Image (cartoon, rainbow, N blue to C red):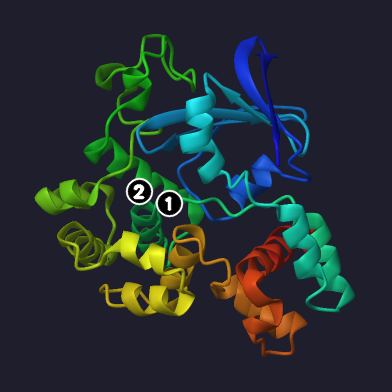
Amino acid sequence: MYNKVKKISHGREALVITELGAYSLSDTLECGQAFSYTQTVSDGAYKEYIIPIGDVLLTVGQERLGELIFYGADDEMLDNVIAPYFSLNTDYGKIADTVAGSYGKPWFKEAVEHAKGIAILKQDPWETLFSFIVSQNNNIPRIRKILRRLCLEYGENLAEKSSLEACPLSKHGGTPCRENCGECGVCYSFPKAKDVCECPEKLLLANPGFRYRYLCDAAARVNSGETDLSAIEAAHSYAYSLEELKKITGVGDKVASCVALFGLGNLDAFPIDVWMKRAIDTYFDGSLDPAVFGEYAGVAQQYIFHYIRNLENK
């Protein structure tokens, strides 16, 4: 579906992936589905980010739509980390056409056209669950701040593990290590459920507020296997995902739907937050059955969310 070529890009060895249609890296990362990315370069059309994915610290850039530039990556990383996470084997051009034809209003077709560069990332289910519990009644800057602090407390310094010679954010002049990296946390791996269970008091260092109890319960259930995220994912059922996730203290429809869509691959999941409630009131006369969008209701949700949050205000 995509083409790959190894070449020098921006002075570094890179694996360049092309033929990705309208794929927009910035829209995909910054549309509210993920929190662990950090932009390191913004130079005209060129944008670059670092993203901790599992135990890999990935550097990815984009200069034109439909092309992604991965630095320091090889074919094995492409197959095992990059392609799954960025949904490179999913034809979002075809999905966008399908979604655009599912609802006939002109404004919706406009929303799809402007947002069709968004792909649904395939994030780790545990990370997605933990992150969206933190997101409750929270804004994105504070969500990211809490998660960075918890990565610092529980995670591993992936910049140091990767033997990087310099800080990718240019925050200090030394090589990455705990002493030089200080309180940053950007390059650290995500907390594991087991580690949270063993030292729940570290959660308090990030001031999670009322979410503390919810995070503890989620970690305990996932660590014990009572909530088996792998089994939930394997069921390929949005209804079952909601049923199982909502057994966790503090997880309601919105958080469960986000986890189903962004972590479990249920593309028919349809999270409803304040932005979507506003969209439904404004554009759907206060009532909407997501089934109208079919099996890609979650993708339609992202198009609507992107439209009302970003484009309408312009």
Q: Secondary structure at mark 1?
A: helix
Q: Are marks 2 and 1 in contact (CB under 8 Å)?
A: yes
Q: Which residue is mark 1?
A: 142
Quadrant containing the N terminus is top right
Residue count near mark 1 (Cα–Cα under 10 Å), binned few <14, some 14–19, many ≥20: few
- Tell whether 188 sits left or right of 138: left
Q: Which residue is mark 2?
A: 146
Residue 149 percent coordinates (x, y): 31, 41
Name which residue lies at 62% across and 46% down.
Answer: 89
Name which residue lies at 45% across and 20% down.
Answer: 171
The front one of 163 and 37 is 163
Residue 265 percent coordinates (x, y): 50, 61
Residue 117 percent coordinates (x, y): 73, 50
Q: Which mark is residue 276?
A: none
Report the Cα–Cα distance between label 2 and label 1.
6 Å
Name which residue lies at 28% across and 64% down.
Answer: 211
- Does the rendering let one see residue 9? no
- Identify the image quadrant of residue 137: bottom left
- Above or below, 174 against 22 in this view is above
Q: Amino acid at mark 2?
A: Ile
Residue count near mark 2 (Cα–Cα under 10 Å), binned few <14, some 14–19, many ≥20: many
- Tell whether 294 sits left or right of 161: right
Q: Amino acid at mark 1?
A: Arg
- Above or below, 102 against 260 in this view is below
- Above or below, 176 against 116 in this view is above
Quadrant containing the C terminus is bottom right
- Tell whether 203 sits left or right of 185: left
